[in-house]
Amino acid sequence: MNLYDYGASSAAFRVRIALNLKRADYTRIPVNLLEGAQRTSSYRATNPQGLVPTLEVDDGKLLFQSLAICEYLDEVIPEPRLLPTDSLGRARVRALALMIAADIHPLNNLRVRNYLTDQLEITEEARLSWIQHWIAEGFSAFEAHLASAETGNFCHGNTPGLADICLVPQVFNARRFECDLSSWPKLVEIADHCCALDAFADAAP
């Protein structure tokens, strides 16, 4: 498999973790977002959305969107599982993953940050405030969900899964953007526990 990838991309970070957890053999193909490689005609032919990651699987098919890729990997490489075996557990893990991938991350990704400064011409201080605000909103809700008895050493139970795959890159970004994480001790504890595992550490930017 070939992974079209950028090191600091949260979405690509998720897929690297998933591939590592599955012990999959893959080659990273860099797409430098800061240099605009994602907007070139050659990359648009690979991914018309002009985003990373894109995963080229063994038959040459191209897969897009990090959560869809992770669920594909869970289907074709069943162990270790990224989603629980029970339907309620799967729903909970998907919801936690989407809280980050759909509600926090899109408001703070590179495209949005660039638009805030380049088009709306806000100051760097205001941009940082925007980023910190939406991370805080999302993390407060996420932390509340972690109060569930279903939370263990990881977001759901005692094995890492899809929710943890999404959480770790977002905590990485929160630290990068100087967020005070003291209000969310459980999610920080889980993220740090994950980062002690090779699959997560080896995927880090």
Image: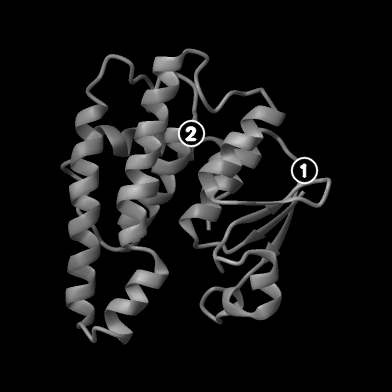
Residue 133 percent coordinates (x, y): 17, 58
Q: Amino acid at mark 2?
A: Leu
**Residue at screen point 82% across, 45% down:** 58
Residue 202 appears in view: no
Report, in whole angstroms, how far the alpha carbon at label 1 lies from the one at label 2.
19 Å
In the image, is residue 102 above or below residue 49?
above
- Depth check, front residue: 186 or 32: 32
Residue receiving disc 2? 162
Q: Nearer the viewer, mark 1 or mark 2?
A: 2
The residue drawn where x is 27% and y is 27% is: 146
Residue behind mark 1: 25
Secondary structure, mark 1, is loop
Q: Residue at x 56, y 42 (%)?
A: 68
Q: Residue at x 30, y 85 (%)?
A: 119
Label 2 CA crowd tier, 10 Å (few <14, some 14–19, many 20+): many
User: Residue 109, located in which quarter of the rendered image?
Assistant: bottom left
Relative placement, left or right, of 130 versus 160 is: left
In terms of depth relative to the viewer, which is nearer, 200 or 147?
147
Disc 2 element: helix
**Residue 33, image x, y percentages:** 54, 73
Q: Residues within 10 Å of mark 1 (few under 14, many from 20)?
A: few
